[in-house]
Amino acid sequence: MGQSLRLVRWLSLILALTLIATSCGGDDGDDEAADDAVSEEDASADEESDDAGEEDADAADEGDADASEGSGDTLVHAADDEPTTLDPAQVEPGEGGETVILQVYERLLEISPDGPVLIAGLATEVPSIDNGLISADGLTYTFPLRDGVTFHDGTDLTADDVKYSWDRVMTMDLPEGAASQLNDIVAETTVVDDLTFEVTLQKPSAAFLNTAVVAMVASIVSQDAVEANGGVVAGEPNEFMQTNMVGTGPYSLTAWNRGENIQLAVNENYWGTPANLPVRIEIGSTPDVRVLGLRAGEYDTIEADPSFIGDLEGAEGVTIAGEGLTVEPIHIAFNLNIPEGVLPEEDTISTDFFHDPRVRQAFNHAFDYQAFIDGALGGFGDFNPHYIPQGIFGYDPNAPRYDTQDLARAEELFTEAGYCPDGFTASVITEEANLFEVAALVLKDSLESLPCNIEIRVLAVAEAQFDDAHAQDPIEYAMWVKNADPFADPHAYVSSYQHPDGEWGAIHGFANGYQDPDRIAQLIDDAEVELDPDARAALYSELQTVLYDDPMWLIAGQEGVVAAYRTDLQGWGSNPLWPRPNMKFQFMNK
């Protein structure tokens, strides 16, 4: 029944936001049939909601009454999904496995609990030119390692393990993982002595420490454990490492019960401040089960989003934290590399539709940003320019940004481009029943409110179907909706999402539409190697201004960090630069 409640919540939100005008569809028979279907669905949903609401109210009352039983001496976290792998060499950025890797493995450097500041991890110092650990030419980084650190299997950490861990990732080079974060920048790794590791870069990179070194893919694994269990084979995953973990972190993995939970034990031999409580990560619970479990005290923390607030606000013993923003902007993609004959048959746009910057600007002006922030995100969110999120170095609060709906300007631009009043039909594909679908529906409502005879078809599909479409190269849809991968440095965002030769620049054919692709590429390339922070920030500021006039995305919003936990939980903290759910369990106690 929990999943039904979740869908009812989304249906209510979707209906409130879309406000689809009947005049857009005229008296078309299909539209009438669709209206009838929606009416029947609404009626069914209302009945289901009433029944489910009564059951949930009873369950909530029972749960609140039993909250004193709690979760005992184990910290229990209810997760959104189950990992596909626990191997740092294979895990995809933003995927559930990173939650566990963050707790069990460690990296040379870590991101401070207090913000984007780098702190020493397995290395004893953060390299800089001032302390001599970065060479004058910016190519060589030296990492002195901590003495006396042991892996969970009892073996000592040495520079050989660090080199092995990084070389392993680059040799395996698994397509589903993030090996490119090392392969694209590292020229050579060297063991200087037992406690000194050295990296030589292919070129100077101001982003190296914030992107490669702190990434989950750069986690340090036990060489002995890997070699005893399959070793390293180029291009092939390691079955042992997919489900087993041998790290140095404050927790060790004791069990992964598929579809049920993951259990972590406190590492009593941890070199740093030890964790307080063992952890159990509950897997596969629906949003409503997570809400009821937190209210009942069965869970200490849950993975949440703004849609949870209404169900938890005012609940006894529950604290809702809503400070800060995630670093995963929700964006609608414009495809400039559409093959002939692949678009849905209902689409009337040409394959070069988005080559015209006026069209892309018009989409950005038409979108109702405030409706998305206030409705879908419950007010927990903000706007950001193209394409550096708030909270990341280089974000310029004075850069121009699309944050206010301007239908008059959108209509003017569509008219100039020849698409108003004759209009067009275009489809956007998205996962169903989540924030991405809501963003697509806000887009539909926004554009169809123009007097331009525009139709936006929202293709809301199951996650697996969307993932297949999203993984195509080239993609066979004009638009899609998702969120960005989380990074700790601006170069990762602008190289992936804005560079004409970057990951999405290549897939979407940005060079086909940028008014000055060479200038944009040069700004991104120059900022990557600029080691002076002020000069680097100035380059990103200029880039954000250029991209406002030449947008390749519509950024619906930057989602707020919403977390919920039991009020008696001590030491709770969050950092959006840590992998979701943006928490380190070692600091918590009760």
Image (cartoon, rainbow, N blue to C red):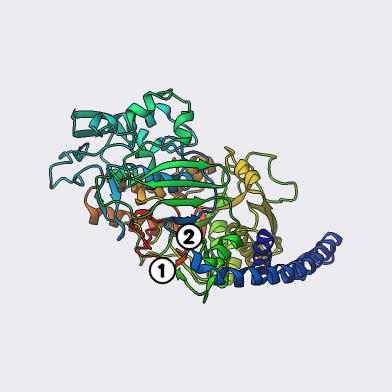
Tell which residue pokes out farthest to the right in this image: 29
The amino acid sitting under disc 2 is: Ser
Residue type pointed to by label 1: Asp
Disc on res. 522: none
Which residue is rendered at x = 66% and y = 47% of the image? 350
**Residue 324 in the image: x percent, y percent?**
40, 65
- Residue occupying image coordinates x 83% and y 65%: 36
Q: Earlier in the sequence, mark 2 or mark 1?
A: 2
Q: Nearer the viewer, residue 565 or 421?
A: 565
Can you identify the residue that label 2 sits on?
A: 71
For the residues bearing labels 2 and 1, Cβ distance under 8 angstroms: no
As drawn, is 365 to the left or to the right of 194? right
According to the image, label 1 marks what residue? 568
Residue 219 position within the rendered picture, expressed as x and y whole percent measured from the top left? 35, 39
The outermost residue toward the bottom is 314
| Disc 2 to disc 1, C-alpha distance | 12 Å
Q: Is residue 406 among what the camera can see? A: no
What secondary structure is found at the residue carrying circle 1? loop
Identity of the residue drawn at 74% across and 69% down: 51
Q: Quadrant of residue 575?
A: bottom left
In depth, the one of 167 and 276 nearer the eye is 276
